Amino acid sequence: MGGSSQGGYFLRPRQSTHQELSDAEINRGLEELLREYNEQEREDINRHLDVLRGSLELTDDDVVRILFGGSQSKHTAVNGLSDVDALAIINDSSLLGEQPAAIIQRMAELIQQRLPQTNVSPGDLAVTVKYSDDIEIQILPAIRTETGVRIADPDTNQWSNIVHPDRFAQKLTQVNQANNGGVVPTVKLMKGLAKQVISSDRDKIAGYHMESLAIEAFSDYDGPKDRKSMLRHFADYSSKAVLKPIADVTGQSRYVDGYLGPANSPQRQRAAKAFQRMLNKFDACKTEAEFKNLFWS
């Protein structure tokens, strides 16, 4: 990241960047950071998705309707961080006879033909397209049938049971509204903080997982609603909650965080330490210079 707001976080003139910040100034700085997060990526993602949609229109009878299923549908995207998962709805039930792996491979080939200089990778569940501007989009093929939507089941290479991709977004929306619209901005800030603090790929926290932790953290939250307080609460709560799996309400998988293994696994213990480290580093920021270095180093 980077950008013009590096010089504009703190709205009143300061004699020195080493002067200790007040809570009000930290909250203003976080608000300015959110404004930049909101501005910097939406147009680029929409442009990329338009091209991808065009790449996947095989015939007049086929797809493709692109539906956001990840951070964009929940408005928690941060440049270079988000799992910008999108469902490619294939309105052709005859394809149920095709194995998902074959359709994923075909999708990857079509996208690569349209974008020969772009990194396109077929996986067990989706096609990942990584752009030179650090935006990464994962497209999951989905079959719409009379009874609902099915996606790939990577364990069997068949189509899954019916999934409900809208349930998660609805739950996050409910929790966000119950907290005066403060949860989604808190997730954005935590993703930004995680990008700077967690350097090892093996310790990175998936965006979907982080959003699931936010739902749990703020479902019964009755604390202060300012940016600093909510960010601290989220990090503190997650440092404990990440030690156990979270059920996936959409039906796409058993757990949203299966990649971390069972409860109290070594991977989960590392994740818990990562959240505690983020909290400690945030609490240690006392000056404007330290604050900028934490979010922009």
Image (cartoon, rainbow, N blue to C red):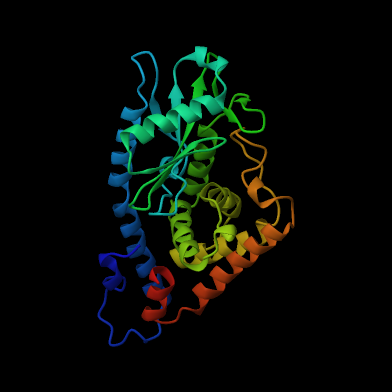
* Residue 141 in sight in this render: no
Q: Quadrant of the C terminus?
A: bottom left
Q: Residue 143: image x %, image y %?
A: 51, 21
> Residue 12 occupies which quadrant of the picture?
bottom left
Residue at the (35%, 56%) spot, across then down: 37
* Residue 57 in sight in this render: yes
Residue at the (59%, 55%) spot, across then down: 217
Q: Quadrant of the N terminus?
A: bottom left
Q: Residue 2: image x %, image y %?
A: 32, 65
Task: Indicate left or right for 235 with 16 as reference.
Answer: right
Picture layout, residue 292 above or below residue 140 = below
Q: Residue 279: image x %, image y %?
A: 55, 70
Q: Nearer the viewer, residue 291 or 57?
A: 57
Picture layout, residue 274 above or below residue 287 = above
> Residue 296 occupies which quadrant of the picture?
bottom left
Residue at the (45%, 21%) spot, across then down: 90
Task: Indicate left or right for 192 with 96 as reference.
Answer: left
Picture layout, residue 109 above or below residue 145 = below
Residue at the (49%, 60%) spot, across then down: 190
Task: Indicate left or right for 235 with 82 as reference.
Answer: right
Task: Indicate left or right for 135 with 177 as reference.
Answer: left
Label count reads 0
